[in-house]
Image: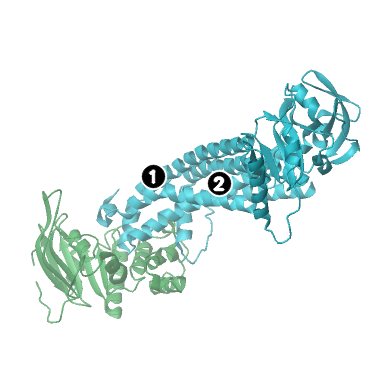
Amino acid sequence: MTLRMHEFYRAFRSLYTAVSSITAKPEDPPQVMPSQLSFASFAWKNLWRRRLRTTLTLGGITMAIGAFVALVGFSRSFEHEWLRLYSSAGTDIAVSENSFLNTSLDESVGAKLRALPLVEDAEPMIFNLMDLTPEVNALVFGWRAESYELNALTLTSGRHFRNGQPEIMLGDVLADNLKKKLGDTVEIQGSAFTVVGIYHGGSALEADAVVMPLDELQQLSSLQGKVAAFHVRLKPAPPGEDADAYLKRARLQIETALPGLHATPAAERAANNQLVVLAHAVAWGTSTIALIVGILGIVNTMAMSVFERTREIGILRALGWRSWNILLLIQTEAAVLGLVGGLIGICVGWGALRVLSVLPQTASVVSAAVSPLHLFEALGIAVLAGLVAGAVPAWRGAHLSPVEALRHD
Amino acid sequence: MTSPMTSPQLEVRKLCKSYDEGRIQALRGVDLSITAGEFLAISGASGSGKSTLLQLLGGLDVPTSGQVLFENAALGSAIDLDTYRAHQVGFIFQAFYLLPTLNALENVQVPMLSVSANAHNRPQRAEALLVEMGLQHRLRQYPNELSAGERQRVAIARALANNPSILLADEPTGNLDSVNSARIMEMLVGIQQKRGMTLVIITHENDIAQSAPRHIRIRDGRIES
């Protein structure tokens, strides 16, 4: 926790420094390479000259990149938690009928699956998102008491549930949120269940979930004899056989033996389940809209800037600057806007993720861990947005007639 | 009009420039030769076409008809205008046109950014030029912190940044008092002689025009004398 606070403080300091540098007094111009003039320092000074507009534009791009980092980060962490849910239990393949949420698969298929040569174990499961209290809802998993997946859960107190009994196990995060301990009862859809175990899960999704007997959840959901999927663990691959090739062979064997069913590798299942796909779609959709707004802000800023600096562009052309020099200068300014807005946006988005990761309502599905790749992606998108937004104003500025530009008031 | 014996550095042939779809004729068939290292003053009333001539000589604009030749090569066809401006021409304007966000040292480096061969030692070379202009104590001042005379001296240093062979000055003393005017003119003539540069000055001040070894007058888009 100390480390987390320290990291948060450092991010806040970066944000504060960036904002301070924009809102500082005009008497204190930033000294970026004071002697050596470069395109970058020239561009920075041009942006600095119109501080208010630059700050407002940065606000737009910051929000866009902040939204991208937070939302896409959230959706990816959600996907990652699903993957951990499979990998921590050792699930190699999920067998289902059509979609992730479909619960029409007959439970008797399990015996056929277990009889296949490459299959070591096949466990039926269903899951649902259920209200436990008016404020708290959670994922409820239905497993058999003999499921290998229970082995991935570390019991911190109590024992495993028994088939056919109104017993549940609570993830430690959820138990904290609900303030429940062993022996307490939890009412789920009008039925009382006794807490017989509290566990620490391999995935954050499990840590904030309920695990109960499959038959009890089937009854609760009026899905007797039906399951959503079978989680399959394969026998070890024969020596010399590539893991991917072995997985492919196993999938083929399952789909051939059980026509109409889909055998999906765990990683693919995690990425393509409807909940994750929906989270990705919402995240990218919202981020894209925010990004378009941010781009329009930069377009406006750069177009105004080029118009106001028409004579200055004429001077530069008179001093020997070529069209592409002008283009480069304006695009550098746009890219700097994107870069700075992106850096601040990353801090904002990452800060939002950290807050969400500690809120009880979202802690189970949001992780504050952001991959460096995601941050580079955000920065790349920010700079690209700047370049796209600056393209038309830059082209216009580059193609101004020097004489016409010099005459401009 | 003078006819130099040596091969001209700049030559203008039947130069015409019109604006507004031909309704305004700024230049009407001007012929002119300028030798390398020459100091030429061009005078004329407002609207006579002298600034238009300077812009065409400097490759800032293209003529409606006629040609501008630099060392016998036509500007705009045989020589790219951008290359010509970047390497051969230094402009000095009446209104100085210094960039307000840059200090004196940085303003002088601006033309250097367009010439990649000039990438090394930019600050040192800019500083040397400003020292030559007597501005060694004003290197890091911004244009609004400089007097009019100092601004024009920075502008002259900037015009010399890429070591051009031609200096084109459009009423360089127009915004200066008499003391600063005399000093700037003395400086320009000194630079022209020391570096052997061609200097073309547009002026409406008779004493400046008369001080040039060669002086032409433009009237209604034609060379009068």
The residue to which callout 1 is attached is A304
Per the model, the C-alpha gap separating discs 1 and 2 is 21 Å
- Left or right placement of residue A144 versus residue A31 in this view: right
Q: Do marks 1 and 2 share a chain?
A: yes
Which one is nearer the viewer's eye here, A278 or B1?
A: A278
- Left or right placement of residue A311 versus residue A189 in this view: left
Residue B110 shows which numbered tag?
none
Specify whether residue A287 is in view.
yes
- Left or right placement of residue A139 versus residue A251 in this view: right
Residue A23 shows which numbered tag?
2
Q: Position of residue A85 (x, y in %)?
A: 74, 42
Which one is nearer the viewer's eye here, A202 or B47?
A: A202
Determine the chain carrying the residue at label 1.
A
Determine the chain carrying the residue at label 2.
A
> Alpha-carbon neighbours of circle 1 within 10 Å: few (<14), some, or many (≥20)?
some
Amino acid, disc 2: Thr
What residue is rendered at 80% in x and 36% in y?
A173
Q: Position of residue A334 (x, y in %)?
A: 45, 51
What residue is rendered at 73% in x and 60% in y?
A239
Relative vertical location of residue A60 with respect to residue A323 in this rendering, above or below: above
Kindly give the residue lying farthest to the bottom in the view shown. Answer: B6
The residue mark sitting in front, 1 or 2, is 1
Q: Which one of the lettered chains is coloured green?
A: B
Specify whether residue A13 is in view.
no
Which comes before the other along the chain, label 1 or label 2?
Answer: 2
Q: Secondary structure at mark 1?
A: helix
Colour displayed for chain A in the image of the structure: cyan
Q: Position of residue B6 (x, y in %)?
A: 15, 82
Relative vertical location of residue B124 with respect to residue A153 in this rendering, above or below: below
Q: Position of residue B155 (x, y in %)?
A: 35, 64
> Alpha-carbon neighbours of circle 2 within 10 Å: few (<14), some, or many (≥20)?
few
